[in-house]
Each structure stands twice: as C-alpha cells, then as structure tokens.
Image (cartoon, rainbow, N blue to C red):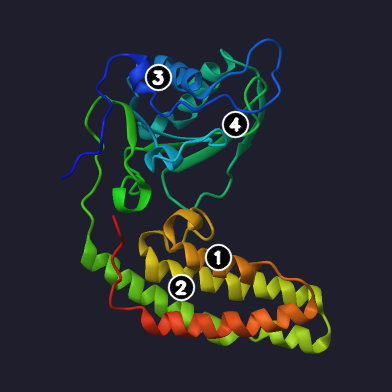
C-alpha cells in the first residue's frame, strides 16, 4: 500500500510550511492566533493520548493551496469509544489559545464512524475556522485517496493504523459510468422546470431551478470530463481544476442579468450539457 506523506523535519518551523501571511483582519486584544499555533497546540494535546492514533491535515494544505483565507481541515483517527473524549481534548487545546467563539456540530454526517464540528476562535481570523473530522478506527472512510483528497499532511501517525489506499481505477470507472447515467436521466426529467416557470412568469422560481438543476448538473458534467475525481465537489476548486476558458464560459452562464438573459442562458446551458455528456465516457479516471 502507498503510504501518505509525513513530515519528518523535527523543527516546528519546518513542520508548518503551510504558514500563511498575516490576514488583513482586526486583532482581538494584542494578539491574533495563527495557523501554526493552532496546529502546534493540537499536536501537543493529542499526541500523548493513547487513544488518538493519527492527526493530519487535508483540504487546501493537501492541495498546496493555503492562503490567508484558508481554514484548517483537521482529521483525527481515534479509538471507536473515545470520540467524545477527543472532542474535549481538542477544545481544551483551542481554548488554551483563545476562547471558542462558536462551535457548529454537524448533526447528520453521511459517513459512518465520522463525527464533525467546526470551530471559530475569538482571537483568530474569521476565516481561520477549524474544520475537525474525528474518524474511528473502524470507519470505512478515511478521506486519504490522494487522487481525490490530495496529499495529506500528517503531523503524527503513531501506530501505522492508517495509510492511503491504492486507487482502484476499474471501480472508479464503473462508478463514473453509473453516475453519468443518473445525471443524464435526472437532467432529462427535470431541466424543463426552468422553462415551465419562465412560461408562467415566475422568474424567481425559474432562476432557482436554473441554479440547482441546470447549472449544478452542468458543473458535474464538466468535472466528469475534465477532473472526474472531484465530480461531486460542486463549485469547490472549480477555478483550479477546469481549463481557464471553461471557467470563463461557466461563469458567464452563472451570472444572469434579468429574465431575457435567463431564457438565453438556459438554452445555452442545455445545449452545452448535452454535448459534454455525449463526449464523456472515454476518459473516466481522475487526473493526478
């Protein structure tokens, strides 16, 4: 099995190469808590705990795209019975730096064995949220496939219980073909909701259907063609992963200027979607 990348430089300065420049953000008191401080506090608090096996970062850091507006996509691997304890340990670590301004717990997570919460700190940039996912050892989903989730940055991996799985191209291709079939059927059945509401003079409803059915389906079709590994990422990373001219064209369709423009762009998007879905199928595997 291919193991995910680990940082081996013992110095903290080297360990945090994802450090970003100072955000243009008001300070709280005399200090503004930064990304490296948050990560260091979590390492110090979590590494000694025998039930916490690994701590890594995904998201922008895993794709080498950290900037001053990036949050921290933190992942922990813990024993099945210690999820609540891990949340407490993380919150104590964060509170050692700053009061927690807000916690948002995700109540309906689609992945078994995964618990998630978001944190904002009073003394940190409003953009520097901590997106914490705590995974149990028995969880089938670890979010480590580099073709999909980037190259995870491990801050510790004590027991070797976790590693990036090999990419199964055959399984992925089958999944993409099935997803393409569903996408075509869904679009064929429901795209005319836009025209129906335009005909009725219900421009707001027509606009909503245009965004949620037509544009959303078009984005997924474009991803299947150009970057299928992220077919379900919606608009996330779209400006990095689709060709520039495609992003420009898509942006023009997304911004609608009035009822007549909606009618015109709906027809353009309809034609583009049908063409893209006809073209896809020969290259279904994700790009590295």
Residue to which mark 2 is pinned: 221
Q: Which of marks 4 and 3 is nearer the N terminus?
A: 3
Residue at mark 4 to residue at mark 2: CA–CA distance: 33 Å
Residue at 54 percent of width and 81 percent of height = 187
Residue 49 seen in the figure: no
Q: How far apart are marks 1 and 4 (CA)?
A: 34 Å
Determine crowd level at label 2: few under 14, some 14-19, many 20+ residues with C-alpha closer than 10 A: many
| Residue indicated by mark 1 | 248
Using the numbered discs, state the Cα–Cα distance from disc 3 to disc 1 in whole angstroms.
42 Å
- Please name which of the two marks, 3 or 1, marks the residue nearer to the observer: 1
| Quadrant in which the C terminus is drawn | bottom left
Q: Which residue lies furthest to the right in this view?
A: 201
Mark 3 vs mark 2: give the one in front.
2
> On screen, 51 above or below 65?
above
Mark 3–mark 2 Cα distance, whole angstroms, equals: 40 Å
List x then y, in percent, for residue 72.
49, 33
Q: Is mark 1 on a helix, strand or loop?
A: helix
On the image, the x and y values in percent for residue 204 come to 79, 73
Residue 119: mark: 4
**Percent x, y for residue 116?**
51, 40
């Amino acid at each position: 099995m291919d193991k995910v990348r680990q940082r081996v430089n013992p110095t903290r300065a080297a360990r945090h190469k994802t450090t970003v420049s100072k955000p243009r953000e008001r300070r709280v008191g005399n200090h503004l808590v930064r990304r490296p401080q948050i990560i260091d506090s979590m390492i110090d608090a979590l590494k000694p705990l025998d039930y916490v096996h690994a701590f890594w970062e995904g998201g922008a850091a895993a794709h080498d795209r950290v900037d001053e507006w990036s949050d921290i996509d933190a992942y922990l691997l813990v024993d099945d019975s210690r999820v609540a304890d891990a949340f407490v340990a993380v919150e104590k670590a964060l509170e050692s730096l700053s009061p927690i301004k807000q916690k948002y717990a995700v109540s309906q997570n689609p992945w078994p064995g995964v618990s998630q919460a978001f944190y904002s700190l009073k003394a940190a940039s409003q953009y520097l949220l901590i997106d914490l996912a705590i995974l149990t050892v028995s969880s089938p989903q670890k979010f480590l496939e580099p073709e999909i989730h980037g190259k995870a940055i491990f801050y510790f991996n004590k027991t070797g219980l976790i590693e990036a799985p090999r990419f199964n191209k055959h399984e992925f291709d089958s999944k993409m073909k099935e997803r393409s079939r569903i996408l075509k059927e869904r679009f064929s059945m429901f795209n005319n909701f836009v025209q129906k509401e335009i005909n009725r003079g219900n421009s707001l409803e027509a606009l909503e259907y245009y965004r949620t059915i037509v544009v959303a389906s078009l984005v997924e079709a474009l991803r299947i063609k150009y970057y299928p590994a992220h077919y379900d990422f919606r608009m996330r990373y779209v400006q990095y992963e689709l060709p520039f001219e495609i992003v420009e064209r898509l942006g023009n369709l997304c911004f609608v200027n009035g009822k007549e423009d909606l009618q015109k762009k709906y027809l353009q998007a309809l034609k583009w979607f049908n063409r893209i879905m006809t073209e896809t199928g020969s290259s279904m595997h994700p790009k590295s």
